[in-house]
Image: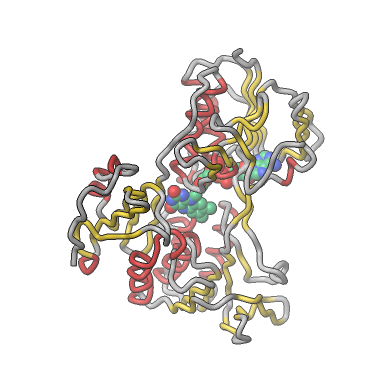
Amino acid sequence: MTPSHVLVVGASAAGLATAEALRRKGYRGRLTLLGGELHPPYDRPPLSKQVLAGTRSPDTTRLRTAEVLAALDAELLLGDPAAGLDPGTRTVRTASGRELKPDTVVVATGLRPRSLPGARGAEGVHVLRTLDDALALRSDLLASRRLVVVGEGVLGSEIAATARSMGLDVTLAGPRPAPMLAQFGPLVSGRLAALHTGHGVRLRLGEAVGGLTAARGRVSGVRLDTGEVLPAEVVVVAIGADPATGWLAGSGLSIDDGLLCDSRCRAAEGIYAVGDVAAWHHELFGAPIRLENRTNATEQALAVADNILGADRPYVPVPYFWTDQFDARIQAHGRLGPDAEATVVEGDPATGRFVVRYQRDGRVAGVLGWNMPRQARLRRPEIGRPVLSPEPSAP
Ligand SMILES: Cc1cc2nc3c(=O)[nH]c(=O)nc-3n(C[C@H](O)[C@H](O)[C@H](O)COP(=O)(O)OP(=O)(O)OC[C@H]3O[C@@H](n4cnc5c(N)ncnc54)[C@H](O)[C@@H]3O)c2cc1C
């Protein structure tokens, strides 16, 4: 049955894309977008890159102009986060005391960054998730010389690259021995480590971080588990983020590293999840997965809108994300990771342009392009197929 009122909780990439897809697919009923932030929907990938570097103004991150948003014919309720949901009656309560009673709820609340114990309150300690976070970090970087980034994942590695390009003295610290090892495995992470050190980023990887030190209310360093302190004027904590499901506590919905959904991205009758917060059953992988990337926010929104309107189709994407660090644009298709065997199949790492194929259990698990977008994309259809003949490893 077509709903008469859809409430999307979370007014960012995935929430907005769901609302737009509903309208494009012919939904004419009431549509509400409820957002926790005061900003109209904006894009996050530029925050750790051009916005932090100052080469793009914050305005350019807006996902839609005011005119386009108005044409969506949706109520946009900003700065009023959802505080609770009763799935039985589909009643959403907000922080300001509003009560909304739609017949369909879409949960699109994204992630909340983790912090380090003891780090709260000290000046100079940052996380990066929102536009306000990016602007606060930029202003601190402009007034400082020495940055330590804690966390060698995608966000930490990007921030280290951007800050180094801004001329800061940058140290990247984290427990794994190379940047993005968990995502890319040793072959590509080794290249990434060389890229960072080649640009002057100091890598202090493979050592756990115990906490931060502060003096007179301002951060003064990052303490490793060995007891050594890495001096810092600014610290970015980029140790991952948790699904923003706190407001669903007590709702009875299943939450386990995200809002658990079936293969249709449905958490319960009339309740769907989309984007970074959604842990849905991927029929090809045979398990719940959750993706934290920009492309999924858009693609999953289309699937959710279809299913709200009665399509009853599973969502089975090939995961994809990109990252920009120094002069490298790295594009990852499929499920990579350190447990997959990685082989250079095109180009040459020494030239800064190459494609890596990942295989697991005799099948192609993924493809990664390093400054070779087209070549990597062309190999995407190989994902899931048996690896027929071993290709010679490029030099
Ligand atoms: C700095 C940064 C750089 C990135 N770079 C890349 C990249 O290069 N490539 C890539 O593929 N991906 C990148 N990503 C990831 C990508 O931006 C996310 O996957 C995408 O934003 C997910 O969209 P979303 O709408 O699910 O979540 P979000 O964009 O996090 O939006 C969730 C929204 O919900 C709001 N919200 C939270 N709780 C509530 C509540 N209780 N009530 C109402 N609203 C609420 C939040 O305030 C937020 O506005 C990056 C992310 C960040 C933070």
Residue 240's spot in the image, x, y percent? 57, 59
Quarter of the picture containing the C terminus is bottom left
Residue 151's spot in the image, x, y percent? 53, 67
Return the residue nearer the eye: 141 or 332: 332
Residue sitting at the far front: 361
Residue 45's spot in the image, x, y percent? 46, 51
Look at the picture and state if 19 lies above or below 189.
above
Instruction: Please indicate, yes or no, whether residue 290 appears anywhere in the rendered image.
Output: yes
Residue 319's spot in the image, x, y percent? 42, 44
Residue at position x 44%, y 64% from top? 180
Instruction: Please indicate, yes or no, whether residue 71 appears anywhere in the rendered image.
Output: no
Q: Which colour assignment does the render follow?
A: secondary structure
Q: How many numbered discs, if any?
A: 0
* Residue 220 sits in quarter: bottom right
Look at the picture and state if 244 lies above or below 96.
below
Residue at position x 33%, y 69% from top? 191
Residue at position x 59%, y 14% from top? 2
Look at the picture and state if 286 lies above or below 237.
above
179 relative position to 90: left or right:
left
Residue at position x 48%, y 58% from top? 48
* Residue 266 sits in quarter: top right
Return the residue nearer the eye: 45 or 256: 256
Residue sitting at the far right: 97
Quarter of the picture containing the N terminus is top right
